[in-house]
Amino acid sequence: MVDDGIFRSGLPDAANFRFLLSLNLRSIVYLCPEPYAEENARFLRTNGIRLHQFAVEGSKSGPTVLDTMSAQEPFVHIPEETIREALKVVLDVRNQLVLIHCKRGKHRTGCVVGCLRKLQKWCLSSVFDEYLHFAAAKARTTDQRFMELFDASSLMHLTAASQY
Protein backbone atom coordinates (compact mmCIF):
# COMPACT_ATOMS: atom_id res chain seq x y z
CA MET A 1 0.00 0.00 0.00
CA VAL A 2 1.33 3.40 -1.00
CA ASP A 3 -1.37 5.42 0.72
CA ASP A 4 -5.12 5.34 1.31
CA GLY A 5 -6.64 4.26 -1.98
CA ILE A 6 -3.30 3.71 -3.74
CA PHE A 7 -1.42 0.42 -4.11
CA ARG A 8 1.71 -0.69 -5.99
CA SER A 9 2.97 -4.01 -7.31
CA GLY A 10 4.72 -5.81 -10.08
CA LEU A 11 2.74 -7.31 -12.96
CA PRO A 12 -0.04 -9.42 -11.43
CA ASP A 13 -0.80 -12.89 -12.71
CA ALA A 14 -3.76 -15.24 -12.27
CA ALA A 15 -2.52 -16.33 -8.83
CA ASN A 16 -2.96 -12.71 -7.67
CA PHE A 17 -6.49 -12.14 -8.99
CA ARG A 18 -8.26 -13.23 -5.83
CA PHE A 19 -6.18 -10.80 -3.76
CA LEU A 20 -6.77 -8.00 -6.27
CA LEU A 21 -10.50 -8.58 -5.93
CA SER A 22 -10.20 -8.14 -2.17
CA LEU A 23 -8.77 -4.64 -2.76
CA ASN A 24 -11.96 -3.49 -4.54
CA LEU A 25 -9.91 -1.73 -7.20
CA ARG A 26 -11.52 0.76 -9.56
CA SER A 27 -8.45 1.31 -11.73
CA ILE A 28 -5.03 0.05 -12.69
CA VAL A 29 -2.21 2.29 -13.90
CA TYR A 30 0.03 0.13 -16.09
CA LEU A 31 3.40 1.70 -16.90
CA CYS A 32 4.68 -0.50 -19.74
CA PRO A 33 4.47 -0.08 -23.53
CA GLU A 34 3.67 -3.76 -24.13
CA PRO A 35 0.01 -4.73 -24.55
CA TYR A 36 -1.65 -5.83 -21.32
CA ALA A 37 -1.74 -9.63 -21.03
CA GLU A 38 -5.07 -10.94 -22.36
CA GLU A 39 -5.75 -12.96 -19.21
CA ASN A 40 -5.25 -9.82 -17.11
CA ALA A 41 -7.35 -7.68 -19.47
CA ARG A 42 -10.17 -10.23 -19.28
CA PHE A 43 -9.97 -10.17 -15.47
CA LEU A 44 -10.25 -6.37 -15.49
CA ARG A 45 -13.23 -6.38 -17.89
CA THR A 46 -15.02 -9.08 -15.90
CA ASN A 47 -14.60 -7.13 -12.67
CA GLY A 48 -15.24 -3.61 -13.96
CA ILE A 49 -11.70 -2.37 -13.33
CA ARG A 50 -10.47 0.40 -15.67
CA LEU A 51 -7.03 0.11 -17.24
CA HIS A 52 -4.96 3.26 -17.77
CA GLN A 53 -1.83 2.44 -19.76
CA PHE A 54 1.19 4.74 -19.94
CA ALA A 55 3.98 3.55 -22.23
CA VAL A 56 7.15 4.11 -20.22
CA GLU A 57 10.04 2.16 -21.71
CA GLY A 58 12.00 -0.02 -19.33
CA SER A 59 15.74 -0.31 -19.64
CA LYS A 60 17.65 -3.27 -18.31
CA SER A 61 20.81 -1.48 -19.32
CA GLY A 62 20.15 1.45 -17.01
CA PRO A 63 22.78 2.18 -14.36
CA THR A 64 22.39 0.82 -10.86
CA VAL A 65 23.68 2.22 -7.59
CA LEU A 66 26.64 -0.13 -8.01
CA ASP A 67 27.47 1.62 -11.31
CA THR A 68 27.88 5.06 -9.76
CA MET A 69 31.66 4.82 -9.91
CA SER A 70 31.50 4.61 -13.71
CA ALA A 71 32.09 7.82 -15.64
CA GLN A 72 30.31 6.23 -18.61
CA GLU A 73 26.88 6.04 -16.95
CA PRO A 74 24.25 5.91 -19.71
CA PHE A 75 21.18 8.12 -19.46
CA VAL A 76 17.84 6.34 -19.24
CA HIS A 77 15.09 8.54 -20.62
CA ILE A 78 12.10 8.81 -18.31
CA PRO A 79 9.29 10.75 -20.02
CA GLU A 80 8.30 13.46 -17.54
CA GLU A 81 5.02 14.28 -19.27
CA THR A 82 3.97 10.62 -19.23
CA ILE A 83 4.76 10.36 -15.51
CA ARG A 84 2.79 13.57 -14.97
CA GLU A 85 -0.24 12.11 -16.83
CA ALA A 86 -0.03 8.89 -14.81
CA LEU A 87 0.01 10.94 -11.60
CA LYS A 88 -3.12 12.79 -12.72
CA VAL A 89 -4.92 9.45 -12.95
CA VAL A 90 -3.57 8.29 -9.57
CA LEU A 91 -4.60 11.54 -7.85
CA ASP A 92 -8.12 11.57 -9.31
CA VAL A 93 -10.28 10.16 -6.51
CA ARG A 94 -12.69 8.79 -9.14
CA ASN A 95 -9.97 6.29 -10.06
CA GLN A 96 -9.25 5.16 -6.50
CA LEU A 97 -8.81 2.50 -5.29
CA VAL A 98 -5.97 2.30 -7.81
CA LEU A 99 -3.06 -0.09 -8.36
CA ILE A 100 0.14 1.25 -9.98
CA HIS A 101 2.36 -1.34 -11.59
CA CYS A 102 5.01 -2.08 -14.17
CA LYS A 103 6.66 -5.46 -14.73
CA ARG A 104 8.57 -5.77 -11.46
CA GLY A 105 7.20 -2.82 -9.48
CA LYS A 106 10.66 -1.31 -9.04
CA HIS A 107 11.79 1.33 -11.51
CA ARG A 108 8.83 2.79 -13.40
CA THR A 109 6.47 2.27 -10.46
CA GLY A 110 9.15 3.62 -8.13
CA CYS A 111 9.46 6.81 -10.19
CA VAL A 112 5.70 7.43 -10.16
CA VAL A 113 5.47 6.76 -6.42
CA GLY A 114 8.56 8.90 -5.77
CA CYS A 115 7.01 11.81 -7.66
CA LEU A 116 3.78 11.30 -5.71
CA ARG A 117 5.81 11.53 -2.51
CA LYS A 118 7.22 14.86 -3.67
CA LEU A 119 3.63 16.06 -4.11
CA GLN A 120 3.00 14.90 -0.56
CA LYS A 121 5.97 17.07 0.48
CA TRP A 122 8.18 14.19 1.62
CA CYS A 123 11.83 15.10 2.05
CA LEU A 124 14.02 13.78 -0.74
CA SER A 125 15.97 11.41 1.52
CA SER A 126 12.70 9.67 2.50
CA VAL A 127 11.64 9.47 -1.15
CA PHE A 128 14.96 7.78 -1.96
CA ASP A 129 14.75 5.47 1.05
CA GLU A 130 11.38 4.17 -0.13
CA TYR A 131 12.63 3.80 -3.71
CA LEU A 132 15.69 1.86 -2.50
CA HIS A 133 13.51 -0.38 -0.33
CA PHE A 134 11.76 -1.67 -3.45
CA ALA A 135 14.59 -1.45 -5.99
CA ALA A 136 17.34 -2.71 -3.64
CA ALA A 137 20.53 -3.59 -5.55
CA LYS A 138 18.74 -2.80 -8.84
CA ALA A 139 18.29 0.88 -7.92
CA ARG A 140 19.16 3.28 -10.74
CA THR A 141 20.79 6.62 -10.19
CA THR A 142 18.89 7.94 -13.22
CA ASP A 143 15.59 7.15 -11.49
CA GLN A 144 16.73 9.00 -8.39
CA ARG A 145 17.95 11.93 -10.47
CA PHE A 146 14.57 12.02 -12.25
CA MET A 147 12.69 12.11 -8.94
CA GLU A 148 15.00 14.80 -7.58
CA LEU A 149 14.51 17.05 -10.61
CA PHE A 150 10.78 16.35 -11.07
CA ASP A 151 8.83 19.61 -10.78
CA ALA A 152 5.74 18.73 -8.76
CA SER A 153 4.45 22.31 -8.72
CA SER A 154 2.38 21.87 -11.89
CA LEU A 155 0.34 19.14 -10.16
CA MET A 156 -0.14 20.81 -6.78
CA HIS A 157 -3.62 22.00 -7.78
CA LEU A 158 -4.66 18.34 -8.06
CA THR A 159 -3.63 17.62 -4.50
CA ALA A 160 -6.26 20.05 -3.23
CA ALA A 161 -8.95 17.84 -4.81
CA SER A 162 -7.54 14.70 -3.20
CA GLN A 163 -6.52 13.98 0.37
CA TYR A 164 -2.97 15.34 -0.16
Image: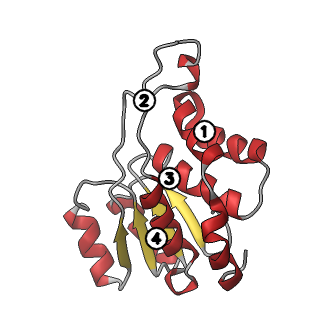
User: What amino acid is found at the position of numbered circle 3 in the picture?
Assistant: Thr
**Residue 61 left/right relative to 65:** left
Please provide percent x and percent y for residue 27: 44, 77
Does label 1 or label 2 sit earlier along the sequence? 2
> Mark on residue 62?
2
Q: How far is mark 3 from mark 1, CA to CA? A: 12 Å
Q: How far is mark 4 from mark 2, CA to CA? A: 30 Å
User: What amino acid is found at the position of numbered circle 1 in the picture?
Assistant: Gln
> Regarding mark 4 in the picture, which secondary structure is present there?
helix
Does label 4 or label 2 sit earlier along the sequence? 4
Q: How far is mark 2 from mark 3, CA to CA? A: 15 Å
Examine the image and state in which quarter residue 162 appears.
bottom right
Disc 3 marks which residue?
Answer: 109
The foreground one among 15 and 122 is: 122
Q: How far is mark 3 from mark 4, CA to CA? A: 17 Å
The foreground one among 41 and 16 is: 41
Numbered disc in front, either 2 or 3: 2
Does label 1 or label 4 sit earlier along the sequence? 4
Q: Is residue 158 above or below residue 131?
A: below
Disc 1 marks which residue?
Answer: 144
Is any part of residue 140 visible from this angle?
A: no
**Residue 128 left/right relative to 85:** right
> Regarding mark 2 in the picture, which secondary structure is present there?
loop
> Regarding mark 3 in the picture, which secondary structure is present there?
helix
- Total labels drawn: 4
Does label 3 or label 4 sit earlier along the sequence? 4
> Mark on residue 20?
4
Mark 3 and 4 residues: CB-CB less than 8 Å, in contact?
no
Please provide percent x and percent y for residue 75: 44, 30
